[in-house]
Amino acid sequence: MARILVLDTSTDSSEHLHVRKWLDPGDAVEVRLVCEGQTVPGPAGWDLAVHTGSALSIVDDAPFHPALFAFVRAAAAAGLPQFGICYGHQMLCRALVGPGAVRRCPGGAEAGWREVRFTSEGRALLGVGERITVFQFHFDEVVRLPSGARRIAWNDRARVQGFADRRRRVVGVQFHPEFDEEAGNAIFRDSAGLLARSGLDAAAVARGGPEGFRMADLLAAAMALAG
């Protein structure tokens, strides 16, 4: 039985629900709703920490950042595996590198079911093929990795779609592997106004679904990789 801590930074406190459905029912899972002010615990006693996505921008300071950044650094020092998704991926890099690790996407938002390519190391580490199709919805990106970390995925919109840091036992992915076709397309439809302001049509974006991977496999691989 794995002891998993999910640090949910989503503004509506919904992200953990999408992550939890892929976890083994036998795992002991604890969720902290960070945006609601719930306390971020210490790293001791866990087998994996998952950092979720968020509608917040990583380039903006948030009230919970000091506590969350301190957790990331303490967990890295203690050897606790960490897996970051989208905002969580960006947050890991900002916590370990500083504000210069992230920026707003110069080409605007990336949204839709988009292809991501993996390096040979990424394919071997995460057990995926050269290309997968994943849910993307982000306005920011990582531009600088922690020292010693390696890029394991990319596409034509974001140079760092994934990274792995074996020394710190950290893995991050820019995309959202936790969203299946139904959940992902519902988010696109509900975000029609936001997408329109970015010059994107929700009906066009909400076509397709994930291909080439399973979230449960990625989580298991991330835990093994971080180890």
Image: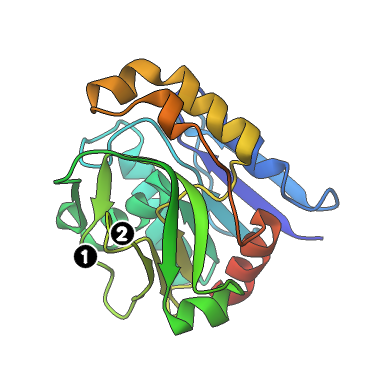
Decide: is 74 above or below 165: above
Left or right: residue 206 versus residue 144 is right
Question: Percent from the top left, x then y, of residue 95?
Answer: 30, 55
Q: Which mark is residue 14?
A: none
Question: Percent from the top left, x then y, of residue 157?
Answer: 27, 54
Tell me if label 1 and label 2 are in contact, CB under 8 Å.
yes
- Which residue does the image show at 51% across and 35% down from the upper left? 207
Question: Percent from the top left, x then y, of residue 53?
Answer: 45, 41
Residue 37 visible in image:
no
Q: Which mark is residue 144?
A: 1
> Which element type, helix, strand or loop, lies under badge 1?
loop
- Which residue does the image show at 40% across and 53% down from the upper left? 174
Tell me where residue 183 sits by quadrant: top right
Q: Amino acid under label 2?
A: Cys
- Which residue does the image show at 36% across and 35% down from the upper left? 64
Left or right: residue 211 versus residue 57 is right
Label 1 CA crowd tier, 10 Å (few <14, some 14–19, many 20+): some
Question: Percent from the top left, x then y, of residue 1?
Answer: 82, 60
Marks counted in the figure total 2
Q: Amino acid under label 1?
A: Arg
Q: Which mark is residue 93?
A: 2
Left or right: residue 132 versus residue 114 is right
Label 2 CA crowd tier, 10 Å (few <14, some 14–19, many 20+): many
- Which residue does the image show at 46% across and 84% down from the upper left? 120
